[in-house]
């Protein structure tokens, strides 16, 4: 392919901008891909910095996807970050990404509502009474938008400490304490291990749906590569392959209270917001009794937590790793572009028939890795915006290589 020449160095594209809502990896990648095609894009970010979502996550966090398959288009993640990139390195990378691509980002601006403009296009209602118009809008506000705390009976009068995993940073405040972590997704599993290794006196993990435990890497082969390979297989076949792999690589923890799931991983992934849990120490911690799986939380009573099997616990603290809401209803729900679960009806380069020019990115959880898909979607969206046709981005840009 002939190298592109001066487009990146000719200064920012001029003219009325397209707006990208959200300055996380998804929004930044789309803005960069649009710019690569000579389209002026302005990112509106409600936080005071880009990549705020990464800065705010727990200290122990490392990507469970590989450095190479987690880079955004046009800038590799540096080799010195290692194979599993740490939280702070990811945040630094996002800042550098915005710099390198010279992105136009307005921080401290939240978009509250998107409305169809008379005569076509979109009006964005944002902080400070702003009314911004644009022919196309990309919604990149994040799958993990608003912490979700179940409506447990008795929670209001419980009186004990209950925090959402989104507020968890490190085990330090829990030294010597009896902690109940609720929810065995990636965050819950990792926080439970963090607490057990970080000095908590006792750690229990309340499990409602048994997780699909997957080794992050086996003999140097990352689970993500398998995810990429099986992604296009029929669900039944993908599930067979993955079931076999799990059986070969993850021990049976039934005796420790964590049986193997009976549903297929991909089938579950498609039907609900479930995701494989990458083992970053849980298997070992459960086997050694450092993390004790218990039944799901049913309700709260004064100072007590009641589990589904009738057990009553009195932990010093409860950490609810109970997921997030996309929270798109207020922003775009009135446009008829969401399904019954609040998920966008279209994704990536496609836009709903009733809402041309309204793009969504980052609202799926593919087994091949969200960051990888965000990167690919960015190129597809940019192409759709510039050509009017959904399609694949240029090979060089998709590959995430440095310009
Ligand atoms: C703990 C954790 C670990 C993860 N690890 C991995 C991993 O290893 N590999 C992987 O591929 N994926 C991972 N993911 C999933 C996903 O890649 C990340 O969540 C990623 O940050 C998603 O990028 P995003 O841009 O879609 O959303 P976000 O990173 O959430 O960014 C959205 C941005 O939009 C802003 N915003 C929201 N609403 C508005 C609004 N109305 N107006 C203006 N701004 C707004 C927010 O402040 C935020 O900065 C992980 C997720 C979590 C929660």
Image (cartoon, rainbow, N blue to C red):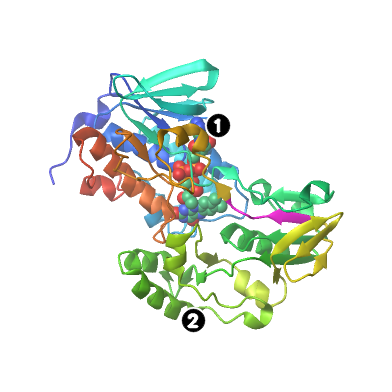
Q: Which residue is mark 2?
A: 247
In this view of the protein, which residue sits in the foreground, 277 or 147?
147
Does the beta carbon of the residue at mark 1 sit less than 8 Å from ligand 1?
Answer: yes
Q: Is residue 403 visible?
A: no
Relative to 150, 36 lies left or right: left
Which numbered disc covers residue 101?
A: none
Q: Which residue is mark 1?
A: 47
Q: Is residue 30 visible?
A: yes
Question: Relative to 90, does residue 255 appear above or below in the rendering?
Answer: below
> Could you tell me how many numbered marks the image carries?
2
Q: Quadrant of the C terminus?
A: top left
Give residue 44's quadrant in the image.
Answer: top left
Task: Report x, y in % for residue 93.
Answer: 46, 43
Write down the region rendered in magenta.
317-323
In this view of the protein, which residue sits in the foreground, 163 or 53?
163
Q: Residue furthest right?
A: 302
Local secondary structure at mark 2: helix
Residue 319 counted in the magenta span:
yes
In this view of the protein, which residue sits in the foreground, 142 or 341?
341
Task: Report x, y in % for residue 39.
Answer: 27, 28
Q: Are marks 2 and 1 in contact (CB under 8 Å)?
A: no
Q: Nearer the viewer, mark 2 or mark 1?
A: 2
Local secondary structure at mark 1: loop
Task: Report x, y in % for residue 80.
Answer: 45, 53
């Amino acid at each position: 392919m002939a190298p592109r020449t001066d487009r990146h160095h000719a200064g920012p594209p001029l003219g009325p901008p397209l707006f990208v809502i959200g300055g996380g990896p998804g929004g930044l990648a789309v803005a960069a891909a649009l710019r690569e095609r000579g389209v002026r894009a302005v990112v509106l970010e409600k936080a005071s910095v880009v990549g705020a979502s990464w800065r705010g996550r727990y200290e122990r966090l490392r990507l469970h996807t590989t450095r190479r398959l987690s880079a955004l288009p046009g800038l590799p993640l540096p080799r010195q970050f290692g194979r599993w990139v740490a939280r702070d390195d990811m945040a630094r990378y996002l800042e550098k990404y915005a710099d390198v691509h010279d992105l136009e980002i307005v921080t401290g601006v939240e978009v509250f509502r998107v409305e169809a403009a008379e005569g076509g296009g979109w009006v964005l209602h944002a902080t400070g009474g702003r009314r911004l118009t644009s022919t196309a809008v990309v919604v990149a506000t994040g799958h993990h938008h608003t912490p979700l705390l179940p409506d447990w009976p008795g929670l209001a009068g419980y009186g004990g400490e209950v925090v959402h995993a989104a507020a968890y940073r490190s085990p330090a405040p829990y030294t010597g304490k009896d902690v109940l972590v609720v929810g065995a997704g990636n965050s819950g599993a990792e926080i439970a291990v963090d607490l057990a290794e970080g000095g908590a006196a006792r750690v229990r993990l309340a499990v409602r749906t048994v997780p699909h435990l997957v080794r992050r890497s086996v003999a140097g082969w990352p689970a993500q590569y398998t995810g990429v390979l099986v992604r296009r297989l029929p669900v039944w076949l993908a599930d067979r392959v993955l079931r076999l792999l799990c059986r070969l690589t993850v021990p049976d923890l039934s005796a420790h209270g964590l049986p193997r799931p009976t549903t297929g991983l991909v089938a579950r992934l498609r039907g609900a917001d479930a995701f494989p849990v990458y083992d970053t120490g849980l298997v070992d911690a459960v086997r050694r009794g450092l993390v004790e799986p218990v039944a799901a939380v049913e309700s709260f009573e004064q100072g007590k937590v009641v589990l589904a099997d009738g057990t009553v616990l009195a932990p010093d603290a409860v950490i609810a790793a109970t997921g997030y809401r996309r929270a798109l209803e207020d922003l775009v729900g009135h446009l008829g572009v969401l399904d019954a679960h609040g998920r966008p009806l279209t994704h990536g380069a496609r836009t709903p028939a009733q809402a041309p020019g309204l793009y969504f990115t980052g609202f799926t959880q593919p087994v091949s890795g969200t960051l990888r898909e965000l990167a690919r979607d960015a190129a597809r969206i940019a192409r759709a915006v510039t050509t009017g046709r959904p399609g694949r981005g240029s090979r060089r840009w998709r590959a995430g290589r440095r310009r």
